[in-house]
Amino acid sequence: MDTRSQHSRFYQEVHGLWPAMPTPLARDGALDTEACRRLVEHVRGEVDGMWLMGTGAGFASLEPSMR
């Protein structure tokens, strides 16, 4: 499948409410997986999907290895 077909298919399949979720970081700068899990559980069943890991300014603050 070429890139154009993949792009078109993505927008046909993505619909509804997809909130941008914050990226919770621990004090040492690592991803706080437990806090991320709690955020997901908080909205699960209320939304159609979630944008995680770098949908806002959080991406720029992540170490390259975490991106």
Image (cartoon, rainbow, N blue to C red):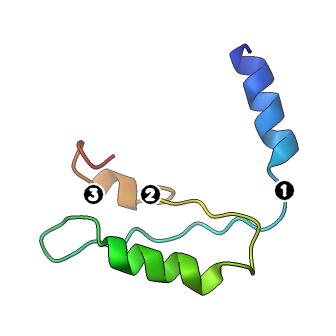
Tell me the residue that label 3 is attached to: 61
* Mark closest to the chain's N terminus, 1 or 3: 1
* Mark closest to the chain's N terminus, 3 or 2: 2
* Mark closest to the chain's N terminus, 1 or 2: 1
- Quadrant position of residue 57: bottom left
Q: CA distance from mark 1 to mark 3?
A: 29 Å
Q: Are marks 1 and 2 in contact (CB under 8 Å)?
A: no
Residue kind at label 3, given as amino acid type: Ser
Give percent across and percent down for residue 63. 21, 50
Give the left or right position of residue 65, taking residue 7 as reference.
Answer: left
Q: Are marks 3 and 2 in contact (CB under 8 Å)?
A: no
Badge 3 crowding class, 10 Å Cα cut-off, few under 14, some 14 to 19, many 20 or more, is few
Give percent across and percent down for residue 51. 58, 59
Q: CA distance from mark 3 to mark 2?
A: 11 Å
Give the left or right position of residue 50, taking residue 37 as reference.
Answer: right
**Label 2 residue SS:** loop
The residue at 40%/68% (across/down) is 23
Mark in the foreground, 1 or 3: 1
The residue at 80%/21% (across/down) is 5
Give percent across and percent down for residue 31. 28, 65
Badge 2 crowding class, 10 Å Cα cut-off, few under 14, some 14 to 19, many 20 or more, is some
Tell me the residue that label 1 is attached to: 15
The residue at 70%/65% (across/down) is 18
Tell me the residue that label 2 is attached to: 53
Residue kind at label 2, given as amino acid type: Met
- Quadrant position of residue 1: top right
